[in-house]
Image (cartoon, grey):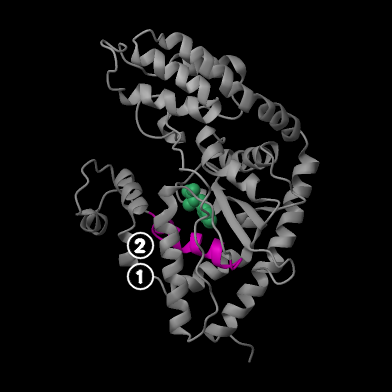
Amino acid sequence: MDKETSKKVVVSGIRSTGNLHLGNYYGALSKFVRLQDDYDCRYFIADLHALTTNPDPASLHQSVKDILAEYIAAGLDPEKNIIYVQSDIPEISEMYLLMNMHVGIGELMRTASFKEKARKALGITSDSDEIEKEIIGNQTNQRVNAGLLTYPTLMAVDILIHKADFVPVGKDQEQHLELTRRFARRFNSFYKTDYFGEPVNFNFEGAALKVPGLDGSGKMGKSEGNCIYLIDDEKTLRKKVMRAVTDEGPQAPNSPVSQPVENLFSLMSLVSTPDTVKYFRDAYADCSIRYGDMKKQLAEYILKVTLPIRERILDIKGNDEYLSKVVKNGAERAREHASRTLKEVREIMGIRKI
Ligand code: TRP
């Protein structure tokens, strides 16, 4: 709870590793927007987290700008929320150093996302548990950078520096949130204080819908090259949807639905009406379905969501003055909260004026 606004505090961010896609939109951004009227929301662009995978400087900078424009275009109001760039808040970096003193490298190495990224960095394809040995013993030029290891510390600090109550994130971030609570408890018990609370995910009504990709498997994600971006133009978007992976079609009435086709149904249920979904489900069941028709419809519905956002993105993106005003103001407001927390944390830890 924030003392001044007496509203519960919400914090979340997205890494700046490229343009935002439909998965980001339904998984995060649309939720951010839903919370903005009732909570004290602080949303940021996680550019320091993006650095853990060593982007080239020009594309990192571009991505921060793009996402900022996309946040606003998707409906995040800079008046209602604190919108900022993570690296604009130096207090986060300092508190990250302090918090690391209470974080174990073992628990960081056991984090699922770390293991996955470390394997990728070392070019390991098996999912054996030998990853720790591989990391320590590796004498080649490939390395797993320390920033990747301490990713969860940085994320915990993003959240704790605001004393957040709620952190709307997807399922893949639950483990990081669990670590955040663990670090908070550990800090409290070490210093015999109840300084930090325990932030939780925000539970929205209804089942959390996964946003699948167009390549027939898994979820929509930047790295997989299977996604629809908010910024995609009409032609590109239609082409992508028409090319989505399917199968040879139902061979007998009421056949089970394959994963790639189920993905199209999932996408359809995100962007269209239950009637439309039922229409195509029925057509699948009685074998009259034509995937081409379904994809055409799907593309139309997706465009209804994304085109207005795209228009606004293009509009906002050209306005550098406006964008820098937004982040300047956001940084000022975020730093007010962050500097208070950092000051208190330093004091608790014994870093005091002589
Ligand atoms: N790790 C998050 C992701 O990849 C991004 C993130 C960084 C974040 N810091 C955060 C999300 C703090 C919520 C709160 O999606």
Q: Element type at marker 1? A: loop
Label 1 CB less than 8 angstroms from ligand 1 = no
Looking at the image, which is closer to me, 198 or 13? Answer: 198
Judge left or right: residue 300 versus residue 335.
Answer: left
Q: Residue at x 72, y 31 (%)?
A: 312
Q: Residue at x 46, y 38 (%)?
A: 209
Query: Closest to the observer: 154 or 260?
Result: 260
Amino acid, disc 1: Gly
Q: Residue furthest bottom?
A: 354
Q: Where are the magenta residues, as a range? A: 145-163
Residue drawn where x is 58% and y is 80% of the image: 346
Q: Is residue 161 magenta?
A: yes
* Quarter in which the N terminus is drawn: bottom right
Q: Few, some or many C-alpha atoms within 10 Å of disc 1 (few <14, some 14-19, many ≥20)?
A: few
Quadrant hosting residue 175: bottom left
Please tell me the numbered disc located at residue 108.
Answer: 2
Q: CA distance from mark 1 to mark 2?
A: 6 Å
Give above or below for 250 relative to 51.
Answer: above
Give the position of the C terminus as an image quadrant: bottom right
Q: Position of residue 164 (x, y in %)?
A: 58, 64
Amino acid identity at mark 2: Leu
Q: Position of residue 172 (x, y in %)?
A: 41, 48
Residue 118: x percent and y percent? 32, 50
Q: Residues within 10 Å of mark 2 (few under 14, many from 20)?
A: many
Residue denoted by label 1: 104
Rendered view: 332 above or below 291? below
Which SS type dominates the magenta stretch? helix
Residue contact between numbered discs 1 and 2, judged by CB atoms under 8 Å: yes
Residue at horizontal 64 percent and vertical 88 percent from the top: 353
